[in-house]
Structures are given as structure tokens and as C-alpha cells.
Amino acid sequence: MLTGSELLAKVKELGDVGKSEIVRSCGYVSTKKDGTERLNFTAFYEALLEAKGVELGKATTVGKGGRKLSYVATVQGNGNLLIGKVYTAMLDLRPGDEFEIKLGRKQIRLVPVGADDEEE
């Protein structure tokens, strides 16, 4: 897949060909399970915008359904405090990972077991 100045040069070189051909020629193609070709328009357009200097938000700032993450958790009616899947994915946490619970004045810190609690 072409990126940066190579991508811009290829798009300019191709000129007036169809969108599908441009995406294919720039290498934004994958193969489906059934063996057919899939054109990755979204990846192509994101790379094109980046090559032109347009910064899009990072994937980690968007939660379910494209909502922006609020970085706020609410205590549920049963007293549980739920941290969503997007947040644990951002930290690459896995089932079974253990944390020490550090309580302070009106705050809770979760520190991975065996880690220095000053790490970020």
C-alpha cells in the first residue's frame, strides 16, 4: 500500500481513471474468505488525507458507534464501577491481568501488580 508522497504521485499519475482502479493501483486491496477481491476505500482515503497533511483523530479516541470517549465512569446502582472495553483495549489489557487498588482522597488508582505505581 502506497503512502505519503508516493501515494500522491500515483494518484496524480493515474489521472481520470475510476475510483476503484485508483484504490486497486495504490495497493489498497485485500482478499475475502471466499477469495474475491475487496477494495479498502476507507484505508485509502485515510492514507490520502494523511499524505495531504490532514490529521484525523486516533482510533483510540472513539468508542462504540463512533462516539468520542468521555473518560468518565459512573458508579452503577449495585455499587460497581465499570471501565469499558475501549479503555482496556487502549492499554492492551487481557483477561486475568491483576491490579492493586490504591485509594486516595476521592480517587481510585489501579496499578498493575508488580509495576511501579509512578509509571504512566
Image: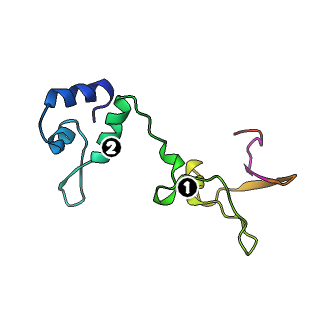
Amino acid type assigned to the residue bearing label 1 in the image: Val
Q: Specify few, some or many for label 1: CA neighbours under 10 Å numbering under 14, 14-19, or 20 or more.
A: some
Provide the secondary structure element on which disc 1 rests: helix
- The quarter of the image holding the C terminus is top right
Does residue 110 belong to the magenta stretch? yes
Residue 32 image point, x, y percent: 24, 56
**Residue that mark 1 sits on:** 86
Residue 98 image point, x, y percent: 70, 56
Horizontal side of residue 36 vs 43, given as left or right? left
Give above or below for 78 relative to 61. below
Q: Which mark is residue 1?
A: none
Amino acid type assigned to the residue bearing label 2 in the image: Ala
Residue at 39% x, 28% y is 53
- The quarter of the image holding the N terminus is top left
**Residue that mark 2 sits on:** 43
Give above or below for 68 relative to 44. below
Q: Residue furthest left?
A: 17
Residue 13 image point, x, y percent: 16, 26
Q: Which residues are magenta?
A: 108-117
Horizontal side of residue 64 vs 49, given as left or right? right
Provide the secondary structure element on which disc 2 rests: helix
Residue at 64% x, 52% y is 71
